[in-house]
Image: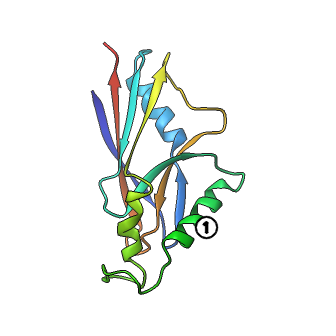
Amino acid sequence: MHSETRGYHTGGADCVLDLTGDCADFVARHQGGRDGLLHLFVPHATAGLAILETGAGSDDDLLAALAELLPADDRWRHRHGTPGHGRSHVMPALVPPYATVPVLDGRLALGTWQSICLVDLNVDNPDREVRFSFLAER
């Protein structure tokens, strides 16, 4: 298994960051033309990974849906940090901190409009890590 961690700066606002290019680069460097699985993991309690269309409004729609489901107000029992910070600790139950994508003939087997994205609602921690792992078929 090949594995590495990459850092990302998500800034001080709710964010959907497209990682698809980095995923394709990682697979190209480590797959050696083999089939397998790309597994991604975010080692944070307040971030997740989603596979969705980006650039046509779906990324903004996801943030709007999460804002409606998880408002940034004082209802949360987890209260340190900025107001509404507790919602960031609930979000990974809806947008999990992991994703796995098939790799076929050395390429990500994503659908035409699918992208792999880091989702971050935690404005208190603008720096994130994502672990990329390639598990080759034997």
Picture coordinates of residue 85 (x, y %)? 39, 77
* The furthest residue to the left: 1
Split into 4 quadrants, where in the image is the C terminus? Answer: top left
Q: Is residue 36 left or right of residue 112?
A: left
For the residue pair 90 and 20, the one nearer the viewer reads as 90
On screen, residue 73 above or below 134: below
Q: How many marks?
A: 1
Residue ID at (61%, 67%): 64
Query: Is 83 placed above or below 99 here?
Result: below
Q: Amino acid under label 1?
A: Ala
Which quadrant holds residue 83? bottom left
Residue 44 position within the rendered picture, expressed as x and y whole percent measured from the top left? 31, 59
Position of residue 70 in the picture relative to residue 132 (left or right): right
Residue nearest the observer in this picture, 115 or 94: 94
Instruction: State the residue position of label 1.
Output: 64
Q: Which residue appears at 32% of the width and 83% of the height?
A: 79
* Coordinates of residue 47 in the picture (x, y in percent): 40, 60
- The percent coordinates of residue 46 (x first, y second) are 36, 64
**Residue appearing at x 39%, y 52% in the figure:** 96
- Secondary structure beneath disc 1? helix
The reply, left or right, for residue 117 in relation to residue 126 is right
Residue 101 vertical position relative to residue 58 in the rendered view, above or below: above
